[in-house]
Image (cartoon, rainbow, N blue to C red):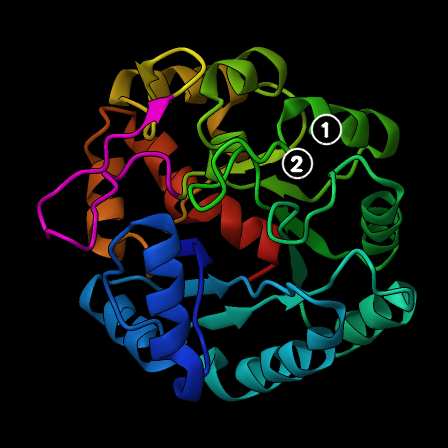
Amino acid sequence: MIIDFHTHTFPEKIAQSAIAKLSASADIKNYIAGTLTDLISSMQNNSIDYSVILPVVTRPEQEKNINRLAIETNEHFHDQGIISFGGIHPYNDDYKAILHFLSTHGVKGIKLHPVFQKTYFNDIQYKRIVSCAMDEDLIVVTHAGYDISYPGADFVTPAHVLPMIKELKPPKLVLAHMGGWNCWDEVYEKIAGLPVYLDTSFSLTPLRSPKSKAATINRYDDRSKRSERLQLKTDEFCKFVRKHGADRILFGSDSPWSDQGESLNILNNTGLAATDISKISGENARRLLSL
């Protein structure tokens, strides 16, 4: 079983404009149009059994529409391998009611994005959400590390993640982008090996600019004048797997920002043992999602 634990889609009427805006702000190429139809087609083309959609609530008032769509998506597209999580904003004061509503309607988890939501991950607003999600037995996926659209925005690096882990010990916390995009050394030192899940999204595939299909982004850190490490090298990734354990790593593509097939092919060619690849590509997610 192959499960892509990290994908995004947009409603048909806003997909084109949303993708164009995000692509321009991050200077990255999208591989599909970002609609549910496109994602299902990509899954079929690449023999992917399930994809988890992770919606992001960027304003508190978006929550109701986003979560209503998530529930409808699960009702109508589960047989096609689609599992949509819900979303919540740290400034939704009725967070307990929202999370209970999602849980009782069969939603398996929520997505948080501290950078887009402009809130530090160790803030009380997130702590209370994660604590309540634990009570509702919900999976919590959070963006982790920096974000390519907001260089230097430090909202959810290991310094913010560690207090949450130590205080609440959430059993179903997933840190996207191998625990912290573009702060790999700190993640390896402080996060790898702790009882949390990491997903592989946006960590192994090359990041290509929309200006040229083959052009790979090369940005520089102004503080050190050195090229940023926008992806993990294969040997670095394998080092992460050995330290953290293959049982707590989940395959994710970050579609539409990476190609599902290319992402899976890179994972399959890391040189990891077949048993580890099987765990990462689907077994761990199947267990976490209770499929």
In this rendering, the count of numbered labels is: 2
- Evaluate whether residue 246 shows in this view: yes
Asked if 170 appears above or below 38 in the picture, the reply is above
Q: Where does the magenta region start and end?
A: 202-221
Task: Give how far apart the Cα atoms at labels 2 and 1 are.
Answer: 7 Å
Q: Position of residue 29 (x, y in %)?
A: 24, 55
Q: Is 25 drawn above or below residue 190 in the view shown?
A: below
Residue located 42% across and 41% down the image = 148
Disc 1 residue type (three-letter): His
Residue 90 sits in quarter:
bottom right
Question: Main SS type for the magenta part?
Answer: loop
In which quarter of the view is residue 166 placed? top right
Dot 1 falls on a residue whose secondary structure is helix
**Residue position marked by numbered label 2 in the rendering:** 155
Q: Position of residue 175 (x, y in %)?
A: 58, 38
Report x, y in % for residue 207: 25, 42
Q: Residue 55 at what x, y percent from top left?
A: 56, 66
Which mark is on residue 160?
1
Give SS at disc 2. Answer: loop
Locate the N terminus and report the quarter of the image it occupies.
bottom left
Query: Crowding at label 2, few (<14), some or many (≥20) Cα neighbours within 10 Å?
Result: many
